[in-house]
Image (cartoon, rainbow, N blue to C red):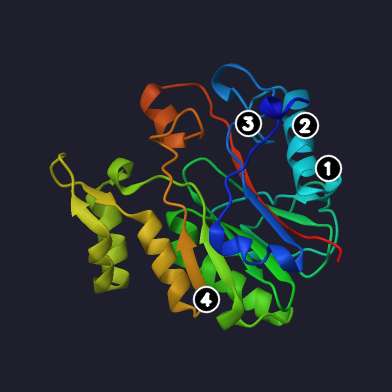
Amino acid sequence: MTDQHKPDPLRSPLLDEARPRGIRHGFFTRKGGVSEGIYRGLNIGNGSADDAHRVAENRRRVAQWMGVAPDALLSAYQVHSPDVIVATGPLPSPRPQADALVTDRPGLALGATSADCGPVLFADAGARVIGAAHAGWKGAFTGVLENTVAAMEKLGATRKNILAVLGPSIGPANYEVGPEFVDRFVEADAGNAAYFVPSEKPGHALFDLNRYTVDRLRKTGVTADALNRCTYAEEDLFFSYRRTTHRKEADYGRLISAIVLEEI
């Protein structure tokens, strides 16, 4: 492959601080894949209706960039839950249902797939413990972020040493929600009202999922940041479930964000 046909994921300066300790990460975009049509680019979605051979090739390219075998690029069957799996090797088939993965084993690339929801990558460079979580509004609301930090602690991480970065997800300018959505959040915590501003549609609001996610991460005691890239707005780089829905398209591609402990 020439460079222009290879994946070229976004990287976080914060997580790059863990690079000298053998921790590699990437927030993959649509660049460098073989899918076509509405899936154009690097669609890694096993759950999409894309050609399975193209998806497999896309996943192989991601695995190659991460420096692992294709079966060591792990992604759970995500169900918008707060559940976390401790990975010790390739996942069984059928894939287990969960929305976060953690490990202390070198050579396993932990992946979070997304198409508007927030992919969050975690690393404790000193303890060499990593994690990846899929945090849409429901996962973030019900505790997937806190549960990922707790699972990393059980493997030897220390939360004050954990770095966590939210990758590309839908931005507040494009995330309009209804009144029942706002009510759910405000009833749980009156302070959540700060994450909503009125939209042009009567009774509706724009939700800042990015800020909500980063704030919840910081409340756990980890160092957290966000790339602040909007999947809905940047069509050339990202797939978006909401953009697809608005266009009444038949399906949509999925992105992946991944992190791995290299052998050192």
- Tell me what residue is drawn at x 26 percent, y 53 percent: 180
Task: Mark 1 vs mark 4: give the one in front.
Answer: 4
Image position of 253 with respect to 200: above or below: above
Q: Earlier in the sequence, mark 1 or mark 4?
A: 1
Image position of 149 with respect to 29: above or below: below
- Tell me what residue is drawn at x 50 percent, y 73 percent: 223
Closer-to-camera residue (3/135) = 3
State yes or no: discs 4 and 3 in contact (Cβ < 8 Å).
no
Q: Amino acid at mark 1?
A: Pro
Q: For residue 38, what is the image quadrant?
A: top right
State yes or no: discs 1 and 4 in contact (Cβ < 8 Å).
no
* Label 3, label 1: how far apart the Cα atoms are: 18 Å
* Label 3, label 2: how far apart the Cα atoms are: 12 Å
Mark 3 lies on residue:
48
Q: Earlier in the sequence, mark 3 or mark 2?
A: 3
Mark 1 lies on residue:
70
